[in-house]
Amino acid sequence: MKILLANAVFTDGTLYRDHGVVFERTVLALKPNDELRAEYGDRCVELGEGSVLLPGLINPHVHLEFSANRSTLTYGAFMPWLQSVIANRDELVNGCDDACIRHAVDMMLENGITAFGAVSSYGFDLDACASSLQKVVYFNELIGSDPAMADALYGNFQERLFASQAVVRDGFYPSIAIHSPYSVHRILIQKALEYAKAHRLRVTAHFMESPSEREWLDENSGDFKPFFENFLRQHRAANSAEEFLTYFDGHPTLFTHVVHAKDDELAHIAKGGHTVIHCPISNRLLGSGAINLERLDAHRIRWVCGTDGLSSNYALDLFEEMKAALFMHHGSDLLPLAYRLWKSVTKNAAEALGLNCGTISAGYDADLLITRVDYPINEQLPLHLLLRRPAIESVYIHGNKVKG
């Protein structure tokens, strides 16, 4: 049993001054420091001036297999970026060996990320994810819009999925990703989702990331048209947006980006109990625009914050991601937005991924951070943690110290 006493505990949108936590594998109690001193005496560990306990952060969406990228890919608009990914894919994927992927995983741990959702296109990141210290929701990605190749594509997907299901490790969850409505044929989607429902697997998908996607799905025109005609000899979109969403009915899903969704599509997402993953830095670098959080709120859609991968980001750092969102959404009241961003990378992200963490509360996994600030702690702490990020001194996962 460990008893840590801090200047403050910040969890679930509440700031507890002069509180501490008692934990083993799970949290046993969150109480005022005076009560803990009276109950446990010299067994208490005093963390000292400026100490703040936080839940471990949760990154719901990251692509690790492109972690070799630094300046290879083209930023500024979605289609130039996509074309640069295709042109440099082999170089980047082959250039990111197991050590490269492990470095990206370690980078997340250094940044306080104790759980993440890894979207895997090739399975090259499986060993690194399986042996990582963090909780991992491992999304095997299905992609392919050519019906003539459906059997081969699904066979490759199954092979990767089964390999992940063979991993026996507490905190590792084999799952399924459907790439997007424009890149996966309906036959493949329906087959994969039937398997997900039968085996109760978690599911994620990209949806409405760019204006090009919107135009292609609605009108079979725009920037995607020459891309699909030249590369895949396709003249029509593989799915309509509404058709795509109906496939996920009855299976709550994490939809990433959703920047260009229409109100009827948001209503469908809300009715299905789905979650939206907001990746502000990626959206800015790829010219996708800024998601309208007020529209999500109007439809009562839960949203969470993720980093995306190093193919469309410069760091795997949720502190940086939240700060970018803070300035991107300049129409939102500052302090309430900061509070909501914190919930988006802790409790709300845990619930969306089906994890028993994201909060410093009795019965939840003891995934937590010991951090320290060099400024007075007040009710604006959630904002100041983003503007003047704290030093992360120690990281605990399942009650075990894994860093510091």
Image (cartoon, helix red, strand yellow):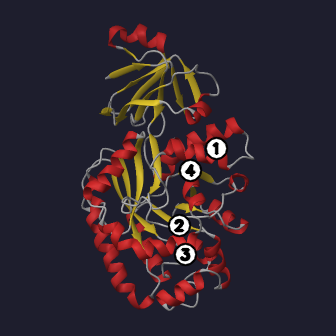
Foreground disc of the pair 4, 1: 1
Mark positioned earlier in the residue sequence (4 or 1): 4
113 w.r.t. 400: above or below? below
CA gap between label 4 and label 2 equals 14 Å
Q: Quadrant of the N terminus?
A: top left
Give the x, y percent position of residue 188: 44, 79
Q: Residue furthest front?
A: 71
> Relative to the observer, which residue lies in front, 346 or 235?
235
Which residue was labeled with disc 3? Answer: 181
Distance between mark 2 and mark 3 Cα atoms: 8 Å
> The residue under label 1 is which amino acid type?
Leu
Could you tell me the amino acid type at mark 3? Pro
Q: Secondary structure at mark 4?
A: strand
Q: Are marks 4 and 1 in contact (CB under 8 Å)?
A: no
Frontmost residue, 57 versus 173: 57
The residue at 36%/62% (across/down) is 65
Q: Amino acid at mark 2?
A: His
Tag 3, which secondary structure?
loop
- Label number found at residue 206: 2
Query: What percent of the width, then of the height, locates residue 89?
Result: 38, 72
The residue under the point 40% across, 72% down is 88
The part of the image, by quadrant, that contains residue 337 is top right
